Image (spheres, rainbow, N blue to C red):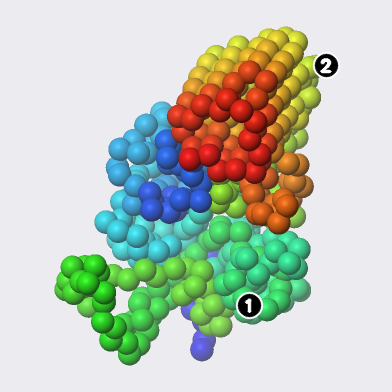
């Protein structure tokens, strides 16, 4: 099939115009991010001193021609109101809007549902970023490759170990031309260790027809009649809403339904990043993501990081409103949130301490997340198990049982003096008065 050629000049004859879409998901997603997502939506959780979505937005603002950004998801409108207000204040030249799905439509379904908003002003191409990805977002390099190759789609890829690759979408590409030859989501056998990073650049006139034909294929597929159980009767026999194209609004995902077809029939290329990348799926994965973003900020000599000293092993982020005793030793890879109090003799390493928490004197917090307004008693130890920062799993096997390698205290947890909490996930409002290991504390 002959592929459509995207003109490098814009539709208006000037330079091509570009937009960006950040996919934020919704409350039924992110369940693996509990107990942290019980109190704050995952995209607004802070790593390295900024919300996860802020890191995505910051990357988008570094592309000068992007003037319009959409957040697409199915959280309530109020969730991102303050974030959008802050972004509009700091970047008045960029229009940022939240487009709310009435139900989960999938990564491609959401784009297609809001195609009129995305296509307004006739942009030539647009970026799509998954908000739960931690990386350096080399969007400018993706744009360069897009223009060099006269591409219709560019995907960001990275190399992982062969064992880890089957947990992700795998890309087979031509090493010389960078053309994507084949794409398989979570293959059962080894195909490639080049994986999908969840960051894309699409030509508007290629992606929407691809999604439309995927919806049509889905509609044309013969439907199996299943007899629902009585508890599902009320929903399953309701008439389905039809789109104006006559298609039912089903979940259509870029990864499962679109990318393999793009690889077969379109000018589809991959930019392989050598920089850091990881997903932020589980609550524990926020700790390695925190480390990666802090290391990046340290390499760029960011002003907001704490100055290295005998008791500050960089990189460390300390919020200006936090009170840290000068005898406490922090780092590497530590984020201290607003109004946190850290007492004398405390040791914190590879950890996130969230706002209004108190770490009392001589306590130890390692490979852990301390939830909002929590209290860690004197001489207490809250610790996880070290795992390599490039490791893509945050669970380990101890005594034949799979446990979280990162210890997590939910909101307003209290750890008594001299109590040791190791490899535990603790739900909000719990008081721990005795030592606990390898447990989920409900």
Q: Where does residue 166 sit, x and y in percent of width and height?
A: 65, 70
Task: Report the mark closest to the observer, 2 or 1.
Answer: 1
Q: Secondary structure at mark 2?
A: loop
Residue 102 appears left or right of 149 = left
Location of residue 245 with respect to 357 vertically, above or below: below
Q: Residue at x 49, y 73 (%)?
A: 256
Residue 435 appears left or right of 231 = right
Q: Where does residue 279 sit, x and y in percent of width and height?
A: 60, 52
- Decide which of 431, 152 is in the foreground and name it: 431
Q: Which residue is mark 2?
A: 310
Q: Where does residue 154 sit, x and y in percent of width and height?
A: 58, 65
Neighbours of disc 1 within 10 Å: few (<14), some (14-19), many (20+): few
Q: Secondary structure at mark 1?
A: loop
Give residue 48's quadrant in the image.
top right
Q: Which of the two discs, 2 and 1, labels the residue nearer the N terminus?
A: 1
Location of residue 83 with respect to 209 vertically, above or below: above
Give residue 318's quadrant in the image.
top right
Q: Residue at x 51, y 51 (%)?
A: 32
Q: Where does residue 182 sit, x and y in percent of width and height?
A: 62, 79
Q: Residue at x 26, y 74 (%)?
A: 229
Q: Which residue is mark 1?
A: 188
**Separation of residues labelled 2 and 1 (CA atoms):** 50 Å
- Decide which of 418, 81 is in the foreground and name it: 418
């Amino acid at each position: 099939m002959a592929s459509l050629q995207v003109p490098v000049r814009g539709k208006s004859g000037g330079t091509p115009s570009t937009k960006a879409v950040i996919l934020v998901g919704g409350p039924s997603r992110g369940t693996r991010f509990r107990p942290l997502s019980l109190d704050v939506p995952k995209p607004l959780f802070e790593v390295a001193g900024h919300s996860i979505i802020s890191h995505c937005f910051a990357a988008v603002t570094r592309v000068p021609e992007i003037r319009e950004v959409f957040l697409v998801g199915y959280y309530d409108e109020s969730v991102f109101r303050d974030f959008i207000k802050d972004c509009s204040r700091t970047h008045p030249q960029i229009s940022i809007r939240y487009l709310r799905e009435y139900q989960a439509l999938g990564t491609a379904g959401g784009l297609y549902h809001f195609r009129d908003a995305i296509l307004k002003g006739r942009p030539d191409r647009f970026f799509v970023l998954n908000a739960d990805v931690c990386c350096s977002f080399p969007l400018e390099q993706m744009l360069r490759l897009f223009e060099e190759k006269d591409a219709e789609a560019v995907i960001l890829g990275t190399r992982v170990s062969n064992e880890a690759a089957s947990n992700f979408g795998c890309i087979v590409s031509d090493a010389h031309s960078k053309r994507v030859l084949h794409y398989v989501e979570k293959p059962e056998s080894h195909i490639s260790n080049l994986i999908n990073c969840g960051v894309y650049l699409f030509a508007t006139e290629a992606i929407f027809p691809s999604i439309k034909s995927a919806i049509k294929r889905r509609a044309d597929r013969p439907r199996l009649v299943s007899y629902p159980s009585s508890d599902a009767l009320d929903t399953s026999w309701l008439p389905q809403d039809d789109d104006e194209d006559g298609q039912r609004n089903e979940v259509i995902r870029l990864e499962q339904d679109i990318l393999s077809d793009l690889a077969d029939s379109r000018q589809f290329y991959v930019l392989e990043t050598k920089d850091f990348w990881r997903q932020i799926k589980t609550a524990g994965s926020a700790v390695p993501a925190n480390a990666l973003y802090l290391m990046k900020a340290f390499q760029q000599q960011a002003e907001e990081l704490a100055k290295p000293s005998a008791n500050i092993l960089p990189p460390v982020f300390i919020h200006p409103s936090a009170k840290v005793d000068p005898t406490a030793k922090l780092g590497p890879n530590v984020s201290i949130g607003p109004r946190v109090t850290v007492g004398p003799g405390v040791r914190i390493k590879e950890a996130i301490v969230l706002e209004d928490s108190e770490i009392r004197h001589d306590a130890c917090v390692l490979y852990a997340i301390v939830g909002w307004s929590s209290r860690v008693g004197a001489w207490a130890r809250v610790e996880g198990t070290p795992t390599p920062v490039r490791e893509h799993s945050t669970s380990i096997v101890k005594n034949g049982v799979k446990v979280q390698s990162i210890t997590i205290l939910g909101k307003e947890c209290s750890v008594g003096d001299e109590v040791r909490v190791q490899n535990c996930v603790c739900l909000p409002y719990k008081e721990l008065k005795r030592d606990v290991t390898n447990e989920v504390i409900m």
